[in-house]
Image: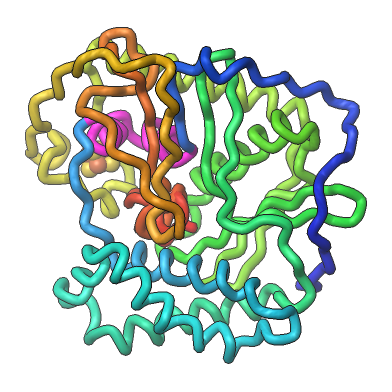
Amino acid sequence: MTAETVTSQTATGGPTDSPTVPPAAAQVTASLSPSRAADFKTCPLLYRFRSIDRLPERPSLEQARGTLVHAVLERLFDLPAEQRTPAAAGDLVAPQWDRLVTEQAELAEIFTTGDLAGPAEFLASARELLDGYFTVEDPRRLEPAERESLVSTVVDEQLLIRGYIDRLDVSPDGALRVVDYKTGGAPREAFEARALFQLKFYALVLWRTRGVVPRVLRLLYLKDAEVCDYTPDAEELVRFERTLLALWRAIEQATLARDFRPKPSRLCDWCNHQAHCPTFGGTPPPFPEPTAPVDPAAPIPPPSRPGARSAPAPAPAPGSVAGAPAVPSQSTVTGREGEAGREGEAASGLGVGSAQEEPGSS
Ligand code: SF4
């Protein structure tokens, strides 16, 4: 692909579309990240396990590698443009892994599963993914406007939607390009719809907050060294917003009824919770009881982003699902999918996102 030169600047373009002006934050009663929304679409029971039961998930090898690669790519752009070479990226791998393990000790557990010979092989596999990145893009010709950026807006006057964007490029004419790194090795077709859902989520937030419909939504598949571009339009984003609100209402209803059903698919192969899933002979844990009401004026914490440099969001109390009338607490559905903790992807798709919202995902 031919790398484009983009510059860092503020998007001020005045589109012909008329995005909704977000209402006052005091009206917000719930929040939703693309990862958790995609969870419910993928499997309502998976959503429950992650967002309500908050069952622990051990990071997979792909999630951990995705988190690492995202961290390296973020730091790569700290370097002067001419120094953003494959060798420089490779030199960042070990230090970034050390930092991540220090901040998230559970990442080191991947070496006890028998999947890998050890850290050396793991780090080498991360460098291979970075080689894939340099095949599809020349970072010396890019100057991202934002990296690992938390974006948010309010829809329907009460639902806060937000998530982390891997990278946002802004061209001299104010055009936005949302870039998402995909590092998972899972079958593409199993996760592409989820990835596109995630990007449309970001596009909607950017349109509502900046008045610009992103010109390009870009997926960079590092393992396959492929680029997938998608061009959204305002009408599509309006429909997507309606879909998102319908999804949220379905989540509220499921919470009220305490009815989250399994939805088996090939993604079950990457699910951490088969032992609790009736589809695999398991039994879900007792549904968490509602907690005491919280101060409605209290700020909703940002979604956690494993691998990111920002502090993780505090875990909400059991049963505190956004907006659910049956659960009086303020709800916050957080979490980044993708590699280990991002709202992202993959084998990770189902795992808690990596440095982004999906393990290996992003
Ligand atoms: S194993 Fe499959 S059906 Fe069961 S919770 Fe996980 S994704 Fe859903």
Residue 18 against residue 93 in the figure, above or below: above
37 left or right of 324 in image = right
Ligand 1 is found in the corner quadrant, namely top left
Residue at 39%, 15% in the rendered image: 296
Residue 122 is situated, as x and y percent measured from the top left of the image, at 33, 81
Q: Quadrant of residue 249?
A: top left
Residue at 90%, 56% in the rendered image: 172
Q: Is residue 14 magenta?
A: no
Residue 8 is situated, as x and y percent measured from the top left of the image, at 79, 59
Residue 340 is situated, as x and y percent measured from the top left of the image, at 35, 58
Q: Quadrant of residue 119?
A: bottom left
Q: Quadrant of residue 125?
A: bottom left
Residue 343 against residue 226 in the figure, above or below: above
Residue at 85%, 56% in the rendered image: 171
248 and 223: which is toward the camera? 248
Residue 321 against residue 359 in the figure, above or below: above
| Magenta stretch, residue numbers | 34-52
10 and 327: which is toward the camera? 10
Res 6 visible: yes
316 and 207: which is toward the camera? 316
Residue 30 is situated, as x and y percent measured from the top left of the image, at 43, 21
Our reading of the magenta stretch's main secondary structure is helix
210 and 225: which is toward the camera? 210
